[in-house]
Every structure is written in C-alpha cells, then in structure tokens.
C-alpha cells in the first residue's frame, strides 16, 4: 500500500511515519507548504527534513507563496485563513497522489495539538472525494511531544511559529 504523506516539517514527521510504517504503508513524503514565510524559514524547514526523513523519498513541489497569499486574500484572520491553508495543502497532496498513482494520502498536520483535528479530517475527506483517492485519517497527537523532544535532542530545527507571516506576527504579539 503506497501513501503520499503531506509533511509540514521535520519534527512532525517522526511519529506519523512510525505509525504509518507499522500499519504497512510504503510512505513517500510531499513537502508542499506555500504558507511558510519567509523563504529562509521555508528552506530551513526543508533542510531539517534531510536529518529526520529516515530514508523515505520526498517530492518537493515548487515553493509558491503567491498561491497562499492569493487564497487568503481578504480572509487573513484565523481560523478562516487556516481552513483555507489546510485545504490548499491537502488538495494539492490529494491531486498529486492521484496523478502519481498513490491510492492513499494523509498529513503530518494531524500530529499537532495546535491544529483543528476535526476540521482537518473533514477537509481531508472532502478533497479525497473530489480527487478520487483515499484520505487515511489517524489521530497522531499522542506522539507530538515525544517526537519534538527527539528532534530537539538530535539538534534538528524546531520552528517557533506555525508558518505564515500572520502566525509569526501573532506569536510576537503574545510575547
Ligand atoms: S497559522 Fe498555520 S495553519 Fe493557519 S494559515 Fe498560518 S500557516 Fe496556515
């Protein structure tokens, strides 16, 4: 069983990859994250994958932040922009899964306690139906803390904000 795994970052890859392999999937990673800004941050997260990818192959679509900005234009407040952001990333993953012959896809976003699990599940199922592939839903949150501790212990970069420029502004305001 081949599965395309939308991957948001290296620390969040650890636990879902372990679970999916245990289920019996042959996993290919898909690093499609036009939401990440600026470019230096995008490259830093991409480079961190090389340390924690455990030998799986990765597909890297072109970095296209203009896609993200075009989609969230006039919907820049959370949670609306997050819903748009998740849909764009999952839609592209589902479409790529179909065109590359993968029956299944899922996302490492499901490991994060900071993302809306139920909405991600709903969006995943919707884009799966639109593209004619299967969304493999699993609640990976149990492995979030341990995986991030492991990433830190290995010296892997762990980001301090979700990804978009708006989330960085929100973080700086909280500080
Ligand atoms: S906060 Fe995170 S999920 Fe929400 S729009 Fe920004 S990058 Fe996407």
Image (cartoon, rainbow, N blue to C red):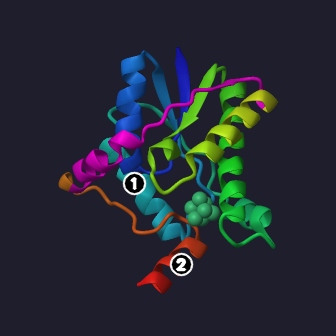
Looking at the image, which residue is at 40% across and 47% down? Answer: 12
Name the residue that disc number 1 marks. 47
Q: Is residue 56 above or below residue 164?
A: above
> From the image, which quarter does the C terminus lie in?
bottom left
- The front one of 66 and 73 is 73
- Whether the magenta-drawn stretch holds residue 143 is answered as yes
Q: Is residue 53 above or below residue 84?
A: above
The local secondary structure at tag 1 comes to helix
Q: How many numbered marks are there?
A: 2
Q: Is residue 103 left or right of residue 48?
A: right
Magenta segment boundaries in residue numbering: 131-152
Name the residue that disc number 2 marks. 170
Label 2 CB, ligand 1: below 8 Å? Answer: yes
- Whether the magenta-drawn stretch holds residue 163 is answered as no
- The front one of 23 and 163 is 23
Q: Position of residue 32 (x, y in %)?
A: 59, 48
1 vs 2, front mark? 2
The local secondary structure at tag 2 comes to helix
- The front one of 24 and 156 is 24
Looking at the image, which residue is at 41% across and 35% down? Answer: 16
Q: Position of residue 142 (x, y in %)?
A: 36, 40
- Place residue 147 in its image quadrant: top left
Whether residue 53 is visible here, answered yes or no, is: no
Q: Which mark is residue 106?
A: none
Whether residue 112 is visible here, answered yes or no, is: yes
């Amino acid at each position: 069983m081949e599965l395309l795994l939308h991957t948001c970052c290296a620390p969040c890859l650890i636990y879902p990859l372990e679970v999916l392999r245990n289920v019996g999937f042959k996993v290919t990673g898909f690093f499609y994250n036009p939401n990440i800004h600026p470019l230096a941050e995008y490259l830093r997260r991409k480079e961190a994958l090389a340390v924690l990818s455990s030998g799986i192959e990765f597909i890297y679509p072109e970095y296209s932040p203009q896609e993200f900005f075009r989609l969230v234009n006039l919907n820049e407040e959370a949670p609306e922009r997050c819903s748009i952001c998740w849909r764009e990333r999952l839609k592209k993953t589902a479409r790529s899964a179909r065109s590359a012959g993968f029956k299944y896809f899922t996302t490492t976003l499901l490991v994060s306690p900071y993302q809306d699990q139920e909405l991600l599940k709903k969006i995943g199922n919707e884009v799966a139906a639109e593209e004619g592939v299967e969304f493999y839903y699993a609640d990976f949150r149990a492995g979030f803390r341990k995986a991030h501790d492991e990433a830190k212990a290995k010296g892997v970069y762990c980001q301090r904000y979700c990804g978009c420029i708006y989330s960085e502004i929100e973080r700086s305001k909280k500080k």
